[in-house]
Image: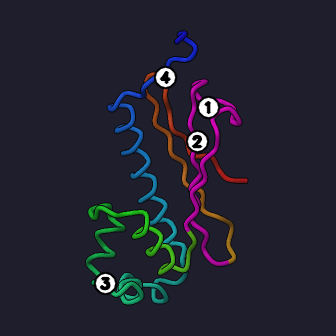
Amino acid sequence: MSDADATIRIPDEILAEQWYGFVHRLIEGMQLAYRNSGEPQELTQKKIAERLGKKPSFVSRCLSGQQNMTIRTIHDLARAMDCRLEVTFRPLKSLRPANNPATSRIAIQFLVGDQQPIAVPVSTAAENFSSVIQDAP
């Protein structure tokens, strides 16, 4: 096997750093979608909890980042907030580099009613790997 065929393993600490940055921005996006979901009396954490069949404290923990959530839970929260969660994977080769030629981008959007999508920027970089959320077209 030649050097060109060798697989480069992404170090665990790089993946962990990117993951925590991603999760932080995801929660930030959920909070933004919640705040932009209408008048405060229209969509409360209690109403979201009722729609999910959960306790309001569960919704509070999710929106504050204190609850470990699956993708399904995040999806269900988005639907209960009258939003649609979208995650897009884009090949590195199709993107222009941000700070580094080896840039990974994932676009996350929270769609609230007929409003423009809420795109959540995520940026963490370490060594030759980075993760950036780019505003979706």
Q: Secondary structure at mark 4?
A: loop
Q: Amino acid at mark 2?
A: Arg
What residue occupies the far front of the structure in this picture? 1
**Of label 1 and label 4, which has the lower sequence position?**
4
Q: Secondary structure at mark 1?
A: loop
For the image shown, how many numbered marks are present on the structure? 4
Q: Quadrant of residue 82?
A: bottom right
Q: Amino acid at mark 4?
A: Thr
Distance CA(mark 2)–CA(mark 3): 33 Å
**Which residue is painted at 38% across and 31% down in the image?**
14
Q: Nearer the viewer, mark 1 or mark 2?
A: 2
Residue bearing mark 4: 7
Marks 1 and 2, how far apart in space? 9 Å
Residue at 60% x, 62% y: name it: 118
Residue behind mark 2 = 105
Label 3, on which residue?
Answer: 54
Task: Give the residue pinned by disc 1.
Answer: 98
Please provide percent x and percent y for residue 26.
45, 56
From what the image shows, is residue 24 above or below residue 83?
above
Reply above or below: 80 against 88: below
130 inside magenta stretch: no
Please report the bounds of the magenta region as a residue range.
Answer: 85-113
